[in-house]
Amino acid sequence: MFYNNNRLTVVQKFTYLGVTLSSNGLFYQAQKALANQSLKSLFPFNSIFDTVALETTDKIKLFDSLVAPILNYSSEVWGFHDANDVENIHLNKF
């Protein structure tokens, strides 16, 4: 395949606007990458929760405000299939 007389290289995956696109058209790699990024943003909360007494509703608000946007980034285009990596972050199984 060519574009402007330049041959296009076929790759297995490509990251565009923070979303990992795979040559197979599935979003498993994108979900795994987003789960890893959201896990990094979740770790500081554990130390905060150990030192500061917060209500459960406040903890949920922090998660929904600071972790969930990373975890659900581009979720509109994932399609319908199991998103185990994303679900594990929600269930705290990491």
Image (spheres, rainbow, N blue to C red):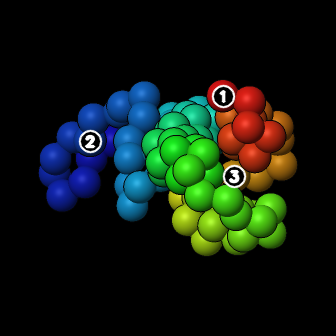
Q: Amino acid at mark 3?
A: Trp
Marks 1 and 3, how far apart at CA = 22 Å
Determine whether, in the image, residue 77 is placed left or right of residue 67: right
In this rendered view, identify the residue nearer to me: 46 or 9: 46
- Dot 3 crowding, Cα within 10 Å, few <14, some 14–19, many 20+: some
Considering the numbered disc 1 on the image, is that residue within a helix, a strand or a loop?
A: loop
Q: Which mark is residue 8?
A: 2
Marks 2/1 in contact by CB < 8 Å: the verdict is no
Give the x, y percent position of residue 38: 54, 48
Residue beneath the point at 63% across and 35% down: 28
In this rendered view, identify the residue nearer to me: 60 or 26: 60
The residue tagged 3 is 78
Marks 2 and 1, how far apart at CA = 38 Å
Residue beneath the point at 60% across and 45% down: 50
Mark found first going from the N terminus, 2 or 3: 2
Q: Amino acid at mark 1?
A: Phe
Considering the numbered disc 3 on the image, is that residue within a helix, a strand or a loop?
A: loop
Marks 2 and 3, how far apart at CA = 25 Å
Residue beneath the point at 42% across and 35% down: 13
Determine whether, in the image, residue 63 is placed left or right of residue 19: right
**Can residue 70 be seen in this snapshot?**
yes
The residue tagged 1 is 94
Q: Quadrant of residue 76?
A: bottom right
Give the x, y percent position of residue 65: 61, 71
Q: Amino acid at mark 2?
A: Leu
Mark found first going from the N terminus, 2 or 1: 2
Mark found first going from the N terminus, 1 or 3: 3
Q: Is residue 54 above or below residue 9?
A: below
Q: Closer to us: mark 2 or mark 1? A: 1
